[in-house]
Each structure stands twice: as C-alpha cells, then as structure tokens.
Image (spheres, helix red, strand yellow):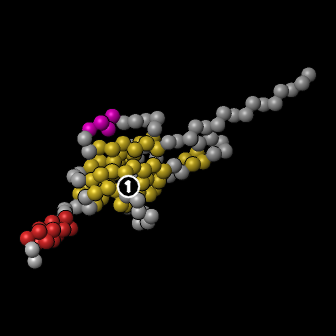
Amino acid sequence: MGGHALVLVLAGLAACGAPLQTVQIVNRTNRAIEEVYVYPSGAADHGRSRGQLQPNGATQVQVKPGFVEVLAVSAKLQVDEHTRDRPSASQGVEVHGPVQVVFYDEASKPAGLDRPGVFGVAFVIPKPKPPEPAPEQSP
C-alpha cells in the first residue's frame, strides 16, 4: 500500500471514530412538545420521536458530527372558537461540538439566543380570526 493510500485509509478511520456530540433541546413554550425528532439533514425518514418535553423542560441527544435537522411538534392548541392547531417548528444545525436548540413561540422570544452554539427556533402560532360582525337589523 502506497503512502498516500495509507493516509487516506487512516483519515477515513479517524472520521468514523469521531466522538458523538450533544444536542440539548429546550422547550420555552407554555405547552408540551409532544414529539421531538433529530435526524440527518435531508433524510426522508425522521426516525422515531426522541420523547416529549414539558414547558421549560429539556433533554439531550447524542449525534454524530455534521448537519442535522431538529423538529418539534407541539401539543394541540385552541387558536379561536373554530380553529385548533398542532404547530411544528424545525431548524437545520451544523454540529461539531455541544449545541443547544431552544423552541419558543414567535411572540415570546426568550433572552440569550444570541450566544454561540445556541439556536432559537420559533413556533408560528396562527392568529385568531376576528369574530364575524352580527348582521345589521333593519328597522
């Protein structure tokens, strides 16, 4: 085996043995997150849910270094009298060290999301529809 081939083989082995990295997932909403998925970016299969998160709860997931997608599916909420929604939010993240992904509602952005290694992901909650005006009564 030539010197260049040996270097390539050793580099490949070193890449396969890269240590797992920690992705901390935090729920900063006032409702539960019912499903959490962490999967390689672009993967058609999201795999199984990594669990649930109560309001202000957190969990950690170990992943291989590289690009991953973090997806959260919220508990169902009542938007208005006629509308319910189960919002979801996701973010692509490049992981080469510990990172934190913080899910929050768009109208309630928490402080501290501007730090290195912290990714804020907003749930977009639909606005309630205004009530329909009562029909005018003619005299």
Question: Is residue 95 covered in magenta?
Answer: no
Which element is circle 1 on?
strand
Q: Is residue 91 left or right of residue 130?
A: left
Residue at figure coordinates x 86%, y 26% from the top left: 137
**Residue most extreme to the left:** 3
Question: Is residue 113 covered in magenta?
Answer: yes
20 or 2: nearer the eye? 2
The range drawn in magenta is 111-115
Quadrant (top left, top right, bottom left, bottom right) of the N terminus: bottom left
Crowdedness near tag 1: few (<14), some (14–19) or many (≥20) residues, C-alpha within 10 Å: some
Residue at figure coordinates x 22%, y 61% from the top left: 20
Q: Position of residue 77 (x, y in %)?
A: 55, 47
What residue is shown with label 1?
69
Q: Position of residue 48 (x, y in %)?
A: 41, 66
Quadrant (top left, top right, bottom left, bottom right) of the C terminus: top right
Q: Position of residue 120 (x, y in %)?
A: 36, 42
